[in-house]
């Protein structure tokens, strides 16, 4: 089944919108904004795309488009780990990448870092280079639907290229900061003059052989150091050679500092270095392009390199290494090629900072030689220069003209439509996934108000997952000296929380598939020593007194003999061990009974409903001391009731009623009386009852 | 052959791979160099603070004026002496980012004590009754992720300002344990045998020219999955204790690996000869060929080389005598670093070509013995000839 293009409703989201971009220049996502800006007009072919300002509003936007009888498709200009886990409609990520592997694992307890899994769940992916397509297909298969679509910059820049570079003086006016070493024929004052302050009006004149680069000086991948040092080594005694560093950075003082420091180390030189830190308007930038003879790139990897495609579209030959994205458009006929080899590095978003991929290490001397050769061609071989200039603009027309990009976009969107039904999102069970996601964010205790996290915020408010105190649930703290056994561990998310605090953990389940998932969850947690056992709760293959913490969550309603299971739980606990036991609440279960399919109440699902007073008696009979009893999850009682009523799949619980309920509950708990109301409703009809108990220090021997 | 405890400075197998790069307790015990007489000790970790010169700080960034920041989630202070009996520790520490308000564990001698980190430095007094001698104080439970939005991209979590130690027992008991631990525990727990394919290097980890980083990362990338591959780094006669941190720093981002990295102090000329005989290859990632003598002495011993063929090495390292690693010039400052003028050139190693050389040399040593023998012979001959440049 595919969706007709005419019925498609495109929604777009980008991390920054026009109002905020100035303050965010140089930050990682800023180039996503520029790509968005250039592609947006081409997307008009599919009707006016609806902007979704924040991902939190996505639910409502998709519901609105469905209400009009249309199929929403969301284009998000962001890397895969910034997509929502639980999108209300299919999402197409548009992202840049420059390394030779993509993450197939996650960290910080945020499953979204696993790009392989995130990319499996989208109808198509869009990136900007053949390199990235190859890397992704290498993992996800040669037929994985990923498209290399560059930003369409050729039409605008080929037009301003004009007759080409001629070395004549050009004036550029803008407001911002400038560091200019001047033509400096004496070479005595290489540190030059500097005007700082973003408000200052500037006028600089450029002439001669101008090499230009556009980069963020604090992005280590861009490698301005090699660009500057090789330039000075090549042209120390050549006053008519100029290197322009157009810096993209939101704060001029910080942006300029590393350039100033480097220049101070270069000693005597007569060539000219001009560093500009300013947000130029189009006129000024166009004039800079016209003054430029060569565009320079010395980076360790590029996802696309917008500035290089712009300058080359304008007929400016490049000095660049033909690797990563540049391999798509840089060649020996339009550029002076640099050599590089590979080196080990980290994925930039990986907070663990482990070597997982490779980037390119430049051959510095090849850059020095390329500068000299380019200069020679510009000054002595105008025929060859014009030829390279023509080759550059022609190659870039084929690469990133509007015509090309329109065609590429159409192919990608058509394939997305065809895949909407073919590639459903095979997501893990919602509740457990949400639990894992809860612990994401920079050390977050409180999941905040993200709409995909309503259930988790609700759980947190009820006392779950207290990271600051190491309590899985209030009163059930876990530390490094504990051995935690989770009977009915499912996908291991409770154990994962315990592992974060250094505990030794053991997972027990009757379902081999669940154990496999638990192993996967815990494998990504390097702090844990973990063991897994396939066993029934009534017969635990563990030594008596082995555990200092015992978890048995939403499990006893599945087992044949709960009394025997609790007796086993008692047996494996050490004297003084703490117990965390939860079961579904009777009222909530009674209510589900009327709406859920019969299989929900048959083996291996729930085979019994515990009356509200049953568990305390069961625990006491086994010899445990009950420390606290709590009830939580009114939100989930209603969510499940709606879930059955909506008749959707658990793997993709996509229904306006469910989305609206999540939004409504999110709003309710933030009202002034919200917490009190939640408390009352949780008591009235909780999803689960939670018991914390203790094995007495000297109890009956069993 | 077996390495001796007294010559072993670092062994990647003594690190607890499961928790990143934490020193195992027995290994830490082997770093004990003197006895504690029970007198009070105060160590200020700032650059001009008193004491702690021979204290090893594992999993921290370099000292700053006020103290130092942790780098890993489980940093350790390794004392040069063992504590025994009832001791009072006064730790002055602070937290950063999400670690402020966080409860972390301070562990010593198998016991742990919780402390709550504060925004500014605060002193925590810990009274500990040690059942067994211990010389390592470990921290656990830190959130060692980069702090979002901070220009400083280091993984700082715990700020360590000072540590005071008092013995609560008088008179001080005889402390013989420390020496026994170094001799016995160290020997028992650290696998000292030297097996498999051994690459020998001679370098000073603190000399930037020696390029320890490329050597370690290329070795682990090329042979990380080979249990029988060992990189044996000779550090000279008296390496400073701080060199361990260089190895740990470079190996932390590598994560768990099967190959082995060992660093040794040169004990006697006889031991050096023995190591050289045991090795299969000489390896270097040097940015300058200042140690041509080292290369020649290893070639002379019949060791083919995996080394760059720049400057004075040129003519000695080629396809006949080993595996030439590509390199090209880049500017540097000599001899300083930081903001010193860039006034000379040295070599930038082609990292991938070093990886390729290591992989191919391993393959030859394991499964192409005729070629390996030819290289050995060529190496001996080359060491007798002046370089053809």
Image: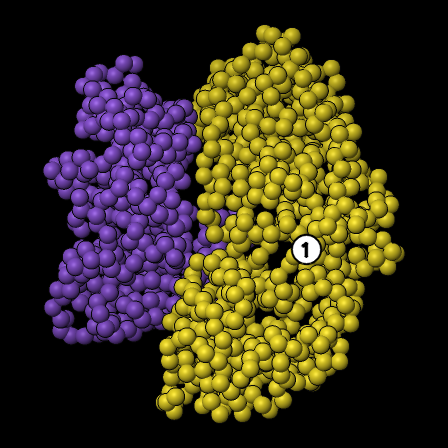
Vertically, is B238 above or below B296?
Answer: below
Q: How is the image coloured?
A: by chain
Could one spot residue B266 in this view of the protein? Answer: yes
Image coordinates of residue B341 in percent, x first then y, are 40, 29
**Quarter of the rendering containing residue A255:** top right
Image coordinates of residue A151 in percent, x first then y, are 71, 34
**Quarter of the rendering containing residue A77:** top right
Of residues B329 and A546, the one drawn nearer to the viewer in this rendering = A546
Of residues B96 and B242, the one drawn nearer to the viewer in this rendering = B242
**Quarter of the rendering containing residue A27:** top right
* Residue at horizontal 44 percent and vertical 54 percent from the top: B156
Horizontally, residue B320 falls left or right of residue A33, namely left
* Residue at horizontal 30 percent and vertical 35 percent from the top: B366
Mark 1, secondary structure of its residue: loop
Vertically, is A553 above or below A31?
Answer: below
Vertically, is A136 above or below A468?
Answer: above
Image coordinates of residue B342 in percent, x first then y, are 40, 27
Image coordinates of residue A525 in percent, x first then y, are 47, 59
Of residues A185 and A416, the one drawn nearer to the viewer in this rendering = A416
Horizontally, residue A459 falls left or right of residue B186, namely right
What residue would you read off at disc 1? A425
Specify the chain shown as purple. B
Colour of chain A, in one word, is yellow
Vertically, is A471 above or below B342?
Answer: below
Q: Residues within 10 Å of mark 1 (few under 14, many from 20)?
A: many
* Residue at horizontal 71 percent and vertical 57 percent from the top: A87
């Amino acid at each position: 089944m595919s969706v007709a293009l005419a019925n498609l409703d495109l929604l777009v989201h980008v991390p920054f919108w026009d109002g905020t971009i100035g303050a965010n220049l140089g930050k990682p996502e800023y180039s996503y904004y520029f790509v968005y800006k250039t592609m947006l007009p081409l997307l008009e072919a599919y009707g006016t795309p609806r902007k979704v300002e924040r991902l939190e509003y996505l639910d409502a936007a998709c519901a609105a488009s469905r209400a009009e009888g249309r199929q929403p498709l969301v284009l998000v200009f962001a890397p895969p780990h910034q997509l929502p886990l639980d999108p209300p409609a299919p999402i197409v990520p548009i992202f840049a990448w420059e390394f030779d592997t993509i993450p197939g694992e996650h960290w910080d307890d945020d499953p979204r870092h696993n790009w392989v899994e995130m990319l499996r769940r989208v109808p198509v992916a869009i990136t900007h280079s053949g390199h990235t397509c190859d890397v992704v297909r290498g993992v996800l298969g040669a037929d994985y639907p990923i498209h290399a679509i560059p930003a369409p910059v050729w039409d605008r820049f080929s037009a301003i290229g004009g007759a080409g570079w001629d070395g004549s003086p050009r004036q550029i006016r803008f407001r911002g900061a400038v560091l200019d070493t001047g033509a400096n024929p004496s070479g005595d004052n290489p540190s030059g003059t500097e005007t700082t302050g973003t408000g200052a009006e500037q006028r600089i004149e450029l002439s001669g052989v101008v090499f230009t680069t556009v980069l963020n000086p604090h992005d280590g991948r861009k490698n301005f150091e090699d660009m500057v040092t090789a330039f000075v080594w090549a042209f120390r005694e050549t006053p008519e050679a100029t290197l322009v560093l157009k810096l993209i950075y939101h704060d001029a003082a910080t942006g300029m500092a590393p350039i100033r420091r480097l220049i101070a180390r270069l000693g005597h030189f007569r060539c000219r270095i001009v560093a500009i830190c300013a947000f130029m308007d189009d006129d000024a930038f166009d004039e800079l392009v016209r003054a430029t003879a060569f565009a320079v790139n010395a980076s360790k990897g590029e996802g696309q390199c917008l500035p290089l495609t712009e300058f080359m579209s304008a007929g400016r030959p490049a000095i660049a290494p033909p690797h990563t994205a540049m391999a798509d458009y840089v060649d020996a006929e339009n550029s002076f090629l640099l050599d590089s080899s590979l080196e080990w590095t980290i994925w930039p978003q990986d907070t663990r900072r482990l070597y997982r991929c490779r980037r390119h290490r430049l051959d510095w001397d090849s850059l020095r030689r390329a500068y000299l050769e380019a200069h020679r061609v510009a000054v002595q071989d105008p025929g060859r220069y014009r030829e390279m200039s023509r080759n550059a603009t022609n190659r870039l027309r084929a690469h990133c003209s509007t015509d090309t990009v329109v065609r590429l976009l159409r192919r990608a969107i058509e394939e997305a439509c065809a895949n909407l039904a073919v590639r459903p999102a095979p997501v893990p069970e919602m509740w457990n996934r949400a639990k894992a996601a809860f612990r994401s964010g920079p050390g977050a205790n409180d999941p905040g108000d993200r709409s995909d996290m309503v259930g988790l915020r609700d759980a947190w408010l009820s006392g779950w997952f207290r990271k600051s105190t190491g309590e899985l649930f209030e009163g059930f703290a876990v530390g490094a000296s504990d051995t935690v056994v989770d009977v009915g561990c499912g996908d291991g998310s409770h154990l994962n929380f315990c592992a974060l605090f250094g505990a030794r953990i053991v997972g027990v389940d009757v379902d081999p598939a669940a154990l496999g998932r638990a192993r996967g969850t815990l494998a990504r947690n390097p702090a844990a020593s973990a063991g897994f056992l396939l066993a029934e709760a009534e017969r635990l293959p563990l030594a008596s007194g082995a555990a200092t913490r015992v978890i048995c969550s939403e499990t006893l309603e599945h087992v044949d003999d709960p009394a025997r299971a609790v007796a086993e739980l008692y047996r494996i606990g050490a004297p003084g061990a703490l117990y965390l036991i939860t079961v579904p609440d009777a009222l909530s279960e009674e209510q589900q009974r009327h709406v859920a399919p019969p299989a929900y109440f048959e083996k291996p699902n729930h085979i019994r409903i515990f009356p509200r007073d049953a568990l305390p008696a069961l625990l006491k009979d086994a010899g445990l001391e009950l420390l606290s009893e709590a009830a939580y999850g009114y939100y989930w009682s209603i969510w499940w009731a709606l879930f059955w009523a909506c008749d959707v799949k658990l793997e993709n619980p996509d229904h306006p009623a469910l989305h609206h309920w999540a939004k409504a509950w999110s709003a309710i708990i933030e009202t002034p009386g919200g917490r009190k109301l939640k408390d009352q409703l949780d008591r009235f009809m909780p999803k689960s009852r939670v018991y914390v108990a203790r094995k007495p220090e000297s109890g009956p021997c069993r | 052959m077996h390495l001796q405890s007294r010559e072993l400075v670092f062994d990647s197998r003594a690190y607890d791979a499961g928790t990143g790069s934490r020193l195992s307790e027995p290994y830490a015990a082997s770093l004990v160099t003197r006895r504690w007489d029970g007198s009070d000790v105060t160590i200020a970790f700032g650059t001009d603070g008193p004491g702690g010169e021979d204290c090893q700080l594992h999993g921290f960034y370099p000292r700053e004026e006020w103290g130092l920041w942790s780098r890993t989630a489980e940093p350790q202070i390794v004392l040069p002496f063992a504590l025994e009996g009832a001791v009072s520790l006064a730790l002055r520490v602070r937290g950063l980012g999400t670690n402020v308000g966080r409860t972390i564990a301070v562990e010593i001698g198998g016991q742990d004590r919780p402390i709550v980190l504060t925004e500014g430095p605060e002193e925590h007094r810990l009274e500990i009754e040690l059942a067994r001698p211990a010389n390592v104080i470990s921290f656990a439970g830190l959130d060692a992720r980069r702090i979002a939005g901070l220009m400083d991209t280091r993984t700082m979590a715990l700020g360590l300002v000072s540590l005071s130690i008092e013995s609560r027992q008088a008179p001080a008991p005889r402390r013989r344990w420390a020496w026994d631990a170094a001799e016995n525990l160290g020997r028992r727990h650290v696998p000292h045998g030297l097996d498999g394919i051994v690459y020998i290097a001679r370098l000073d980890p603190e000399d930037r020219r020696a390029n320890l980083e490329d050597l370690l990362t290329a070795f682990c990338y090329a042979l990380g999955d080979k249990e029988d591959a060992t990189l044996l780094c000779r550090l000279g006669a008296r390496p400073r204790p701080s060199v361990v941190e260089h190895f740990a720093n470079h190996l932390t981002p590598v994560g768990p690996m099967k190959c082995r990295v060992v660093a040794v102090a040169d004990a006697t000329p006889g031991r050096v000869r023995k190591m050289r005989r045991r090795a299969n290859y000489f390896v270097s990632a040097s940015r300058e060929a200042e140690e041509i003598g080292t290369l020649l002495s290893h070639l002379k011993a019949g060791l083919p080389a995996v080394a760059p063929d720049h400057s004075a090495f040129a003519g000695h390292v080629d396809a006949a005598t080993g595996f030439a690693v590509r390199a090209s010039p880049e500017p540097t400052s000599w001899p300083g670093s930081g903001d010193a003028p860039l006034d000379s050139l040295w070599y930038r190693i082609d990292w991938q070509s070093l990886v390729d050389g290591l992989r191919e040399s391993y393959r030859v040593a394991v499964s192409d013995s005729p070629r390996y023998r030819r290289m050995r012979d060529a190496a001996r001959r080359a060491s007798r000839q002046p370089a053809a440049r």
